[in-house]
Amino acid sequence: MGDARRRDARRGSERLVAITLRAASSDEVLDILGRAHCLTPRETQIVRHLVNGLTTQQTAGELHIAPFTVKHHLKAIFSKVGVSTRGELVSALTGRSSDVKTPV
């Protein structure tokens, strides 16, 4: 029998296993790709804000940090992901193109 059906030798009965697949949410995809690029949790937060269209100022306000700190994180993120613009970053981490062209 296949992997989904196994015989329980102690009881002599069959156990059935059901596997359900679903598409990953955008947050799950960002988390996975963030880990793949060795982004810190804070860098992943900043990427999430960027993907959602927030500016540096808005991201700084949401995260209660200085705009300079957001820019510093973005430079590190760009280096880790191997991109040089926000649009390239969004594209690399979401698979969709972005009209954002502003470099850090």
Image: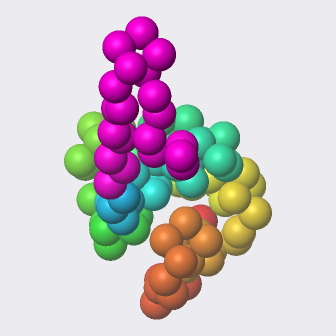
Q: Is residue 27 left or right of residue 104?
A: left
Res. 72 visible in picture:
no
Residue 69 placed where, x, y %?
49, 43
- Number of numbered discs present? 0
Res. 24 visible in picture:
yes
Query: Outermost residue, front direction?
Result: 12
The quadrant where residue 74 appears:
bottom right
Is the residue 29 above or below the residue 55 in the image? above
For image coordinates 47% across by 33% down, the residue present is 6
Relative depth, front residue between 35 and 14: 14
Relative depth, front residue between 99 and 6: 6
Q: Is residue 83 left or right of residue 101?
A: right
Residue 37 placed where, x, y %?
67, 49
Residue 72 counted in the magenta span:
no
For image coordinates 66% across by 41% down, the residue present is 38
For image coordinates 34% across by 39% down, the residue present is 16
The quadrant where residue 56 appears:
bottom left
* Magenta range: 1-20
Residue 19 counted in the magenta span:
yes
